[in-house]
Image: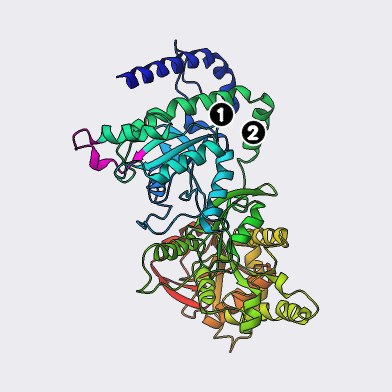
């Protein structure tokens, strides 16, 4: 009863505070694009959906291992992004994962962290993850302290509580008892567990179930006043200059081409080639866990950053391995997640190990060839990055350094003949060398991947190309009526041929090679579709070129592959 009275008084104070700040909020709200829905006698509810993501409050989920932090993260963002697997003796989550939570009409940035063990030995993986969590907690606004309702107060929960008071004394976390679904039906079990959790010293806990969704309303009620007060202070402190700048940026970005849209970049490769080190070098911060241990990354970590005014979504994937029957648990889930990340990306950055290339005397192993060919088959842009070049510097390795820079591009072109001109970048992610070179090459490949060529220019070009191609005879030469680009990302073209004579595979490869050379489209896959038209068919004209997609059956040639598209 006393607890209910305390919460009622706290709610009254919150409502009075909102009334006092409403006038200031009504003036400052437009600066962040927030609309006030009419005037009333009390403060209108804050519309979090209209606030820019970068300005939303940040809530970090903390707790000891295996209490359901990743499951709650997935519940809040309404997607199954974080790996969830019941491993009491192991830790699935090792990196900080960020997402936008959607809890009713609330929107906030939520961070999933690794399980905390305060007594972890120095230099161990748990000690390094705890250091990363401490750095993130220092930049967060609120915290959710997650516990296991079925286990009660665990000794590690008390240690986490002490750790929180030491590293974030300014944050009072909200204690949430997860896995409470089995206690709702039992007599006084839930109340007993709640009283026991009060020993942590952070107030009354909330009973939730991340797996079933129970208790999400109570979590909403606890978070809403805290997040509203934070946003009201942000709106109050926002000056009009920021509003004018954001308005100018929004108005200038209304008409942009596809190459200016956010870029999705996935870093893939075999284990322990330096993918996570490369991500930290690109972000210029210690965003993910790195170390000498192979297979350290498990989750596909997605981050956003800006480079030269362009938004880039960067994904660090787990080491690419062939999935076997013996591979089970979190490792199997990591492999599946890496493959999904490859399909979602626009550009694939395939990372190789320079020292392994020197020792093995070959540029790519089977797993890396599989990644490269999969990227080409899916129509993605490919950039090869040779990492750890710092290990080849010195008096005795100077010849090896130069030899690798000369041989690797040639071998890659031989292994992947489907795409010519694949860019190869040599870097040292540990030393931070080559960051600008990598990003500039990725952007250049992305712009080629999004390029569109005018139809008139293509047809003038095709006449010159067809005239210099060697044909068996005049009768064997197909009558090309029209050539046009129907889509980008990747560039896809349709050639209209009149009569029964079709372009052969050799002809298609010649046109593809000429396209890449004359229009500087090297390093990306190009697809050419062929369609037969009759004399009376007018679908080859530019007026009706939009009907190309309605073809009943057409032969699609993607460099070396022939497939029948319905």
Residue 181 magenta-drawn?
A: yes
**Which residue occupies the foreground of this view, 98 or 516?**
98
Q: Residue at the bottom extreme?
A: 472
Going from N to C along the chain, the mark reached first, 1 or 2, is 1
Q: CA distance from mark 1 to mark 2?
A: 9 Å
Q: Residue at the top extreme?
A: 41
Quarter holding residue 553: bottom left
Crowd rating for badge 2 (residues with CA inside 10 Å; few <14, some 14–19, many 20+): some
Q: Position of residue 433 (x, y in %)?
A: 73, 62
Q: Secondary structure at mark 1?
A: loop
- The residue that label 2 is drawn on is 246
* Residue 390 showing in the rendered view: yes
- Check contact, mark 1 vs mark 2: CB within 8 A: yes
Q: Residue at x 34, y 31 (%)?
A: 218
Q: Where is the C terminus found, in terms of image quarters?
A: bottom left
Q: Secondary structure at mark 2?
A: helix
The magenta segment: 177-189
**Which residue occupies the foreground of this view, 46 or 379?**
46
Q: Position of residue 31 (x, y in %)?
A: 60, 26
Residue 316 left/right relative to 237:
left
Residue 171 magenta-drawn?
A: no
């Amino acid at each position: 009863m006393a607890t209910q009275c305390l919460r009622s008084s706290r709610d009254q104070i919150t409502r009075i505070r909102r009334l006092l700040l409403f006038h200031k909020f009504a003036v400052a709200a437009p600066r962040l694009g927030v609309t006030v829905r009419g005037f009333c006698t009390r403060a209108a509810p804050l519309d979090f959906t209209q606030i820019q993501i970068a300005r939303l409050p940040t809530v970090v989920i903390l707790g000891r291992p295996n209490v359901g932090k990743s499951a709650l993260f997935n519940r809040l963002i309404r997607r199954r992004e974080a790996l969830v697997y019941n491993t009491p003796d192991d830790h699935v989550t090792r990196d900080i994962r960020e997402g936008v939570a959607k809890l009713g009409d609330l929107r906030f940035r939520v961070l999933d962290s690794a399980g905390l063990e305060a007594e972890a030995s120095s230099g161990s993986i748990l000690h390094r993850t705890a250091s990363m969590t401490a750095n993130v907690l220092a930049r967060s606004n609120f915290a959710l302290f997650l516990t296991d309702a079925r286990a009660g107060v665990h000794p590690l929960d008390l240690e986490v509580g002490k750790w929180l008071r030491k590293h974030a004394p300014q944050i009072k976390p909200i204690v949430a008892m997860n896995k409470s679904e089995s206690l709702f039906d039992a007599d006084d079990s839930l109340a007993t567990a709640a009283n026991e959790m009060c020993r942590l010293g952070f107030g009354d806990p909330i009973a939730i179930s991340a797996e079933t969704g129970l208790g999400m309303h109570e979590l909403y009620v606890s978070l809403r006043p805290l997040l509203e007060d934070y946003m009201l202070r942000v709106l109050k402190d926002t000056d009009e200059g920021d509003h004018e700048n954001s308005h100018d940026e929004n108005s200038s970005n209304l008409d942009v081409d596809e190459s200016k849209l956010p870029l999705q970049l996935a870093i893939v490769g075999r284990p322990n080639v330096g993918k996570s080190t490369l991500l930290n070098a690109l972000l210029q911060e210690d965003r993910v866990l790195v170390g000498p241990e192979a297979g350290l990354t498990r989750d596909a970590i997605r981050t956003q950053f800006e480079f030269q005014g362009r938004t880039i979504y960067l994904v660090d994937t787990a080491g690419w391995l062939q999935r076997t029957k013996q591979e089970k648990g979190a490792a199997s889930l990591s492999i599946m997640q890496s493959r999904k990340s490859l399909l979602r990306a626009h550009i694939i950055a395939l990372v190789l190990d320079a020292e392994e290339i020197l020792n093995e005397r070959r540029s790519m192993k089977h797993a890396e060839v599989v990644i490269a060919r999969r990227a080409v088959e899916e129509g993605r842009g490919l950039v090869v990055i040779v990492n750890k070049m710092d290990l080849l510097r010195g008096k005795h390795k100077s010849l090896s350094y130069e030899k690798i820079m000369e041989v690797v591009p040639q071998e890659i072109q031989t292994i992947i003949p489907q795409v010519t001109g694949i860019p190869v970048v040599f870097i040292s992610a540990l030393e931070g060398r080559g960051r600008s070179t990598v990003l500039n090459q990725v952007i250049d490949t992305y712009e080629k991947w999004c390029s569109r060529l005018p139809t008139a220019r293509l047809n003038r070009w095709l006449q010159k190309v067809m005239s210099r191609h060697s044909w068996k005879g005049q009768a064997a030469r197909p009558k090309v009526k029209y050539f046009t680009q129907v889509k980008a990302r990747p560039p896809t073209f349709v050639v209209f041929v009149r009569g029964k004579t079709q372009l052969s595979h050799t002809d298609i490869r010649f046109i593809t090679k000429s396209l890449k050379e004359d229009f500087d489209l090297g390093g990306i896959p190009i697809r050419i579709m062929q369609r037969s038209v009759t004399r009376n068919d007018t679908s080859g004209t530019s007026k009706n070129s939009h009907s190309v997609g309605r073809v009943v059956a057409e032969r699609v040639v993607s460099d070396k592959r022939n497939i029948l598209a319905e």
